[in-house]
Amino acid sequence: EEIYNTYVLATDYKSWALLMHCAEKNKSPRYLSSFIMSRRKRLGPNVISYLREKLP
């Protein structure tokens, strides 16, 4: 059985969100990935640093 979950780790509800995706398959390692989604082309370095600190 394969299990896929996506979690919202942080958001400001108007311009960005930090998501974590977890995929688990029988007899194989768990796969984690993260996404920073933004409504703007670029985020400030302070926002990116803040979001990186939120990652496990």
Image (cartoon, rainbow, N blue to C red):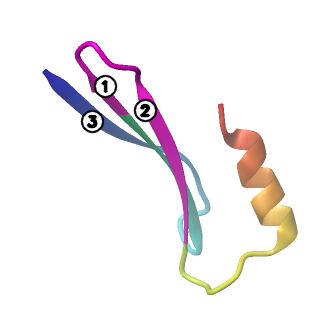
Question: Which residue, given by chain and number where applicable, does mark 3 sit on?
Answer: 4
Q: Position of residue 28 (x, y in %)?
A: 33, 19
Question: Which residue, given by chain and number where applicable, does mark 2 sit on?
Answer: 31
> Which numbered disc, 1 or 3, marks the residue closer to the eye?
1
Q: Between marks 3 and 2, how big is the CA–CA gap?
A: 10 Å
Which image quadrant is residue 54 in? top right
Q: Earlier in the sequence, mark 2 or mark 1?
A: 1
Chief SS of the magenta region: strand
Residue at the image point whose x is 27% and y is 35% from the top? 4
The type of residue carrying mark 3 is Tyr
- The reply, left or right, for residue 32 in relation to residue 55 is left
Residue at the image point whose x is 43% and y is 32% from the top? 31
Query: Is residue 34 one of those drawn in magenta?
Result: yes
Question: Which residue, given by chain and number where applicable, does mark 1 sit on?
Answer: 24
Which image quadrant is residue 25 in? top left
Q: Earlier in the sequence, mark 3 or mark 2?
A: 3
Q: Are marks 2 and 1 in contact (CB under 8 Å)?
A: yes
Q: Secondary structure at mark 1?
A: strand
Q: Earlier in the sequence, mark 1 or mark 3?
A: 3
Please say if 31 is above or below 50: above
Residue density around tag 2, few if under 14, some if 14–19, many if 20 or more, within 10 Å = few
The type of residue carrying mark 1 is Glu
Specify start and end residues of the magenta stretch as a single range.
23-37
Please say if 15 is above or below 23: below
